[in-house]
């Protein structure tokens, strides 16, 4: 009997189905990155957030806790497929601990590179995750209290 939670098992199967890759420690076609599922979920009391529905109909939400110029925490929620979960987790993981300016440079291509690519029909998931992260950053920077503080 496996100690792996049912969701983790489902996610591995879903990502393998979508990407055509299998989980493993090494070798051709192995997914060697770890999806940090502690980042999955709606954050209580975020400093900023964004929600975007992509052309595929899947919705990505990104939540940020920002102190001064640094993203201290990031999380995401999606109603999308395994590829969306992987991309949302990657965007959140890459943003946490970075300055706002550094995190704003995380784009779909960077996410695709980190996850080792996705099939053409799922590449949009990386761009949806990046766009939602950038929108959450923009929403923070557009807040009147932020502009007054920085002035």
Image (tube, grey):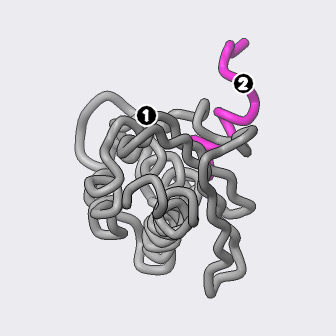
**Residue drawn 67% across the image and 68% down it:** 51
Above or below, 78 against 33 in this view is: below
Mark 1, Cα crowd under 10 Å, few <14 / some 14-19 / many 20+, is few
Q: In which quadrant of the rendered image does the C terminus lie? A: bottom left
The one nearer the camera, 31 or 50, is 50
Residue visible at 51% across and 36% down?
73
The tally of labels here is 2
Residue 63 image position (x, y, % from top left): 61, 50
Q: Is residue 18 visible?
A: no
Q: Mainly helix, strand or loop, the magenta region?
A: helix
Give the CA distance from mark 2 to mark 1.
15 Å
Q: Which residue is mark 2?
A: 5
The answer to whether any part of residue 8 appears in the image is yes
| Secondary structure type for disc 2 | loop
Name the residue located 64 percent from the left edge and 74 percent from the top edge.
52
* Left or right: 138 in relation to 110: right
Give percent across and percent down for residue 146: 50, 57
Instruction: Locate residue 141, reporting x and y percent.
Output: 47, 64
Give the number of the disc on residue 34. 1
Quarter of image, res 101: bottom left
Q: Secondary structure at mark 1?
A: loop
> In this picture, which residue range is highlighted in magenta?
1-14
Give residue 119's mark.
none
The reply to whether callout 2 and callout 1 are in contact (CB within 8 Å) is no
Does residue 12 belong to the magenta stretch? Answer: yes
Instruction: Locate the N terminus by quadrant.
Output: top right
């Amino acid at each position: 009997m496996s100690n792996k939670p049912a969701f983790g098992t489902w996610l591995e199967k879903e990502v393998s189905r979508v990407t055509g890759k299998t989980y493993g420690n090494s070798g051709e076609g192995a997914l060697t990155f770890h999806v940090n599922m502690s980042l999955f979920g709606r954050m209580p009391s975020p400093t900023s957030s964004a929600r975007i529905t992509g052309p595929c109909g899947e919705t990505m939400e990104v939540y940020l806790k920002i102190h001064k110029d640094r993203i201290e925490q990031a999380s995401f929620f999606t109603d999308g497929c395994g590829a969306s979960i992987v991309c949302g987790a990657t965007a959140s993981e890459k943003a946490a601990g970075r300055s706002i300016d550094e995190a704003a440079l995380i784009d779909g291509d960077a996410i695709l590179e980190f996850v080792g690519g996705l099939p053409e029909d799922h590449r949009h998931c990386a761009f949806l995750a990046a766009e939602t992260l950038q929108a959450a950053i923009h929403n923070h920077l557009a807040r009147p209290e932020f502009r007054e503080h920085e002035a």
